[in-house]
Amino acid sequence: MLARAHAFTIEDLHTRHVTVEVDVRAGLPAFAIVGLADATVREARERIQAAILNSGFDFPARRITANLAPGDVRKVGPGLDLALACALLAASGQLPREALERMALYGELGLDGSVRAVRGTLAVAQAARRAGMSGLALAGGHAREATLIDGLRVAVVEHLRSAVRVLSGGPPDALPERRHAEAEERRTHVARQLDQRDLAPGAPEPDLSDVRGQRHAVRAIVIAAAGAHNLLLSGPPGTGKTMLAQRLPSILPPMSTAEAIEVTRIHSLTGARVEQLVARRPFRAPHHSITAAGLVGGASRGWVGEVVLANHGVLFLDELSEFSRSTLEALRQPLEDGRVAIARARHSALYPARFMLVAATNPCPCGYAGDGERCSCSEADMARHRRRLSGPLLDRIDLLASLGRERERDTRASAPICSEQARERVAGARERQVARLSDEGVTVNAQMDARMLRAHVKLEERGERMLAAACRQGLLSARGEHRVLRVAQTIADLNGSERVRAHDVGAALAMRPDVSLARSRAA
Amino acid sequence: MSACASCMRRSWLLAELSGPLECCARDRARLLELLRLSDAELVKAVGGRRSAELRARYGAFEAGELPREDGVEAICRHRRGYPDGLRSASAPPMLNVAGTAKRLASLATAPVVAIVGSASASDYGMETARGLARGLAASGVTVAASLTDGITVAAHMGALEAGGASIAVMGGGLGGSCPARRRALYARVTRCGCAVCELPLDHGGRRWGQLASERIVVALARLVVVVEADESPADLFGARIALALGRSLAAVPGRVSSPLSCGTHALLMEGASLVRGPQDVLELLHLPGTPARDRTAPAPARAAIGGCGGLEPRLKGTLERVGSGCDTPDKLTHAGAEPSDVLLALSELELMGLLARGDGGRYVPRHPLPS
């Protein structure tokens, strides 16, 4: 007899609908799974047999063939266990077959028949909805993720027996309490790395008002947030570069629902436990020893890199000059296109990676150039430092903020700016950009290309003269001029003015990044 | 023009004794003494076990043994056009010249000013040396400096900016001893000025050669200006040679609190002339056409500001504040200005060439190009 169930498998960041067909017929007792199943799926045979017997059901001593369709998609992960077991029970007449038609099943089985949660629940729930399923049965552990998707009945089944009960028309198990402090959590390596603050909405957020002084840098970070410009922070150790960067997410506008679902989905697929939509923009700060594969992903199938985890958020590279050259080179495509295309020998994948890059560096190897007279670097040290920083990455950075050491008196004199105020200004500036750029298919100034700059940036005459003078004197390249224009436009948006004034151009010029951060005049 | 065999033999001998001389270079005074010795005395002093062999090869030396290169001429003290400053015993008897020997002769007959200073200078020192060289080159003064790091590089850059010519004294065999990061600058210097060295062209350059080149720089010059030097013997070596050779010595002061300038301050205390800008140097050279020292004349910094006629008061105020130490946007804002006004003024001044970006987001005043 034949039975059919519906399940899903995860392929990189996407889910594929899998139809599980189980055929039970007379013959020598055997259990075969066909349909491009990987090791974790093939191992399911043992789990399913034990689970069915230990749950008090009958495991037919006949020839059992399970087929996973479509046959050309590689099936991975233990999430197919539940569907296989239920299809088998239906095929052997222990369960009504038509119950499996509209209910998708997703879960891993224990030998005792208990159902365990599997990563990627949110994506699976989304896919189940798209596939026209009326419900999704899964373990309690990640069930709250699935409830984030509207129009899908989520049935919690903690045991194979509960699954049979639900499929026979009975009530599901209770949705577990929100996040209890249970230690048992099956999480992948990436999930352990995931910043907990992103997931726990209750924790207090770092606020911009924690930063004392550094008004210039604070201004720069607000401008960067308003126009989604990539930002480079440069300054001696201990002046607050990292502190500032960590406060950037707090002034960015809140994510739209679509963005939030995308971010949550990625978190869920990497194995984090998600109970509600991620509200905060991601903030990823990988250590500088990271490899290119760690940054963009593709080390193994389905492994996403930091740039993907930073999607719609901030990627912060502290000590930029310590990152290896090849790692930084790998950032070029995501910075340009907002996505990463990974191609490996056996698979290729396209991941979303639209993030703001914030980098921090010391102005020289010892860190003290320009700070009193303490710099002890030789000319050769400086040249090396410059070489490491220069190149394609700096071409994509619009803003440079230099942080200096401040006197106590000065830091106390200035009233701090709080995140809420800044966020409002940023949101206002973003609205203006969206209104202006809506026809162009981009939303922020940082994405304006040369043609859009010509079409949309209205320069006052004095500002135009300044730009022309800067180009004439070799202070700006053609690309540099575009960067200054973009930033000037963002400053104008922040001030709410229609035209770009000379003041805005002046400030953008003063914050333009130099390839050489210190002692450039010598080389 | 070419050099005679006996003078070229000296160059060959120095290269052969490069190893022992490198050992002696730890004591700078001894190195200078050694370089003053005659060939025979030099072999006796540092030849050691190789003395006999060296003497034999010395006797059999032929000028053809030394490598040649296109575009490089050798010139010695027995030929016309050899710089007058190099006729003393301590100076080398011959030089290899990139750029032509004729050009070297004409550059050396103009008043020559040597610019020496720290190899790891601050942006203030770099900007000062650059402005100084620019002003001097524009006034027809030849700038001489070695070509290593820090101040000397800024000096050559400044001279080139004014379209002037400079003399670079190399510590090894011309281009070959030039570090990769200075190749471009070396090429620019030799295009309109000269690069010279006393060692054979294939010599890779060692520390003692670098020190020895300092004595050539000083010997070429009428006046030695020290821009930013701390109290280390390395930074003050040029000044010590100038005193030994009887060249007039001048120094540019820095902030009294800056350890990088304490060497120049010590020189000023000892009686070196104080230099604030190119004008002061021209006066020290007593160049015809420059006014005698007028005590009531405004200081160069103020003259520079006043000289940019019609500078708006807000720009003038910003420039003055930057000059007096409020040199970052933050400090200027704390001094009571609107942030956007500050940034506008800084950018405008940078575009006018009156400010340059310094290290760590600071701004440094620049001497404007003399018109």
Image (cartoon, coloured by chain):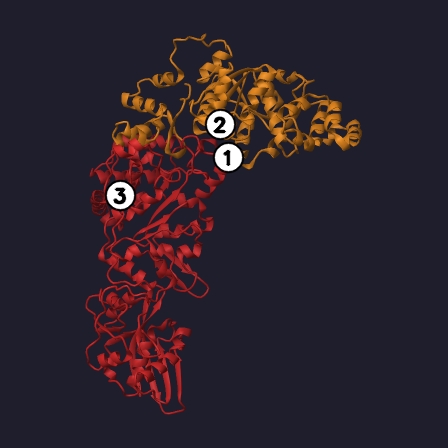
Chain colours: A red, B orange
Say which label, 3 or 1, has the lower sequence index.
3
Query: Can residue A133 be seen in the rendering of this structure?
Result: no
Name which residue type carries label 2. Answer: Ala
Depicted B230 relative to depicted B297: above or below: below
Residue with the mark numbered 2: B154
| Residue for point 36% across, 60% down | A192
Residue with the mark numbered 1: A378
Q: Nearer the viewer, mark 2 or mark 1?
A: 1
Where residue A57 sits, quadrant-wise, is bottom left
Q: Chain of mark 2?
A: B
User: Residue B363: x and y, percent?
Assistant: 37, 29
User: Residue A205: x and y, percent?
Assistant: 26, 50
User: Residue A374: x and y, percent?
Assistant: 44, 32
SS of the residue under disc 2: helix
Tell me whether circle 2 and circle 3 mark residues in contact (CB < 8 Å): no
User: Residue A167: x and y, percent?
Assistant: 23, 80
Name which residue type carries label 1. Answer: Ser
At label 2, counting other C-alpha atoms closer than 10 Å, the crowd grade (few under 14, some 14-19, many 20 or more) is many
Q: Nearer the viewer, mark 3 or mark 1?
A: 3
Q: Which circle marks residue A208 in the picture? A: 3
Q: Nearer the viewer, mark 2 or mark 3?
A: 3
Name which residue type carries label 3. Answer: Leu
Q: Chain of mark 3?
A: A
